[in-house]
Image: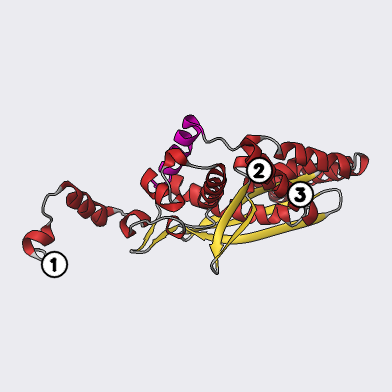
Amino acid sequence: MKQELMESAAVATVPNPASAMIEQESQRAIAEVQAAIILAKRFPRDIISATDRIMNACQRPALAESAIYTYAKGGTEITGPSIRLAEAMAQAWGNVQFGIRELEQRNGESTVEAFAWDVETNTRQVKVFQVKHMRFTKKGSYALEDPREIYEMTANQGARRLRSCILGIIPGDIVEQAVDECEKTMKAKADTGPDAIKKLVTAFESIGVNKEQIEKRIQRRIDTITAANVIGLRKIYNSLKDGMSTKSDWFDVEEDEQAPQTGVEAAKAALKKSGMPSAEDLFGKDEPK
C-alpha cells in the first residue's frame, strides 16, 4: 500500500512539458514588456528630435510617393497617410511597439489583432477583428483555400487596422505636418520623364489598370502627363494597394475586369475571348446532362 502511494505521488509530480513551455513563454513575454518600459523611462523621446526624424523621412522621395492615399466619398476626394507613412512615423517617434498577429484560425475565418503601444506614455490602441476566408465579387463570392491568398487577405485587412492604431497614438498635429512634408516632396520630385512614366504605367498594369484607362482618367496622352497628374495617380495607386478604394472608383473598368473569376466562370470567359463557341451557344442555357 505504501509503495502504491509513493508511485502515484511520483506520477503526480512529473511536469507537463506543454504546461512548462507555456509558462516559460509567458515569463519571457512579461520580461520583454518590463524591459521595454524600463528602457523607455530611462531614455525618453526628445519630441523635437523625433519630429525632425519624421520630417527628414518624409523628404525621401521613395517614402513620399507611397505616403498618401486618396479615395472618393460623397463626391469629394479624401486624402490621408498610408500604412507606409504610419509605420515610418512610428519608427521615428520612438518607444513604440506595433504589429499584427493572428490569434486564431478556424471555421473558415481568422481572428486577428492589430496593435500600437507607446511604451513611454502607456498609450495603447488595439483592434481585434475577424477576417472571413471569402472573396466577394460583383458576381458572387467563393471560399479561399490557398494559404497564400488567405495570408494576403489577412495581411491586407490587418494593415488598415494597424494604420488606424498607429495614428491613434501619434499626435495629430505631427501627422498633419508629415503629410504636408510628403506633399512638398512629391511636388518637388515629380518626374514626368519617359522612364518615370513607364514605371508608373507598369505599376498600374500590375493591379489591372492599363494605359488607355489612365489616359481617360487624366484626359490626356500619357506622354504629355503633368506633375500634378503624376502626384494624383500615385495617391490613387496607394489607395488601391491599401484597399481604401476599388478600380471602378477611378477608372472605367468592365465588370469582368473588376470581379475576379474562378472555375466555370473563368473557363467561359476564356472561351468567349478565344472566339470558340461555348456550351450555352451550342445547346442553350439548359446544357445537356
Membership of 20 in magenta stretch? no
Which-is-in-front pick, marks 2 and 3?
A: 3
- Indicate the amino acid at tag 3: Gln
Q: Residues within 10 Å of mark 1 (few under 14, many from 20)?
A: few
* Residue for badge 3: 177
Alpha carbon of mark 2 to alpha carbon of mark 1: how far? 62 Å
Tell whether 222 sits left or right of 155.
left
Residue 123 placement: quadrant: bottom right
Horizontal and vertical percent position of residue 23: 73, 47
Residue 5 point in image, percent of width and height = 72, 51
Asked whether 187 or 174 is in front, the reply is 187
Of the residues shown, which amino acid type is indicated by label 2?
Pro
Q: Nearer the viewer, residue 16 or 88?
A: 88
Magenta segment boundaries in residue numbering: 193-210
The percent coordinates of residue 128 (x first, y second) are 64, 60
Query: What secondary structure is the stretch in magenta mostly built from?
Result: helix
Mark 1 lies on residue: 285
What label sits on residue 17 in the rendered view? 2
Quadrant of the rendering where the C terminus is positioned: bottom left
Q: Secondary structure at mark 3?
A: helix
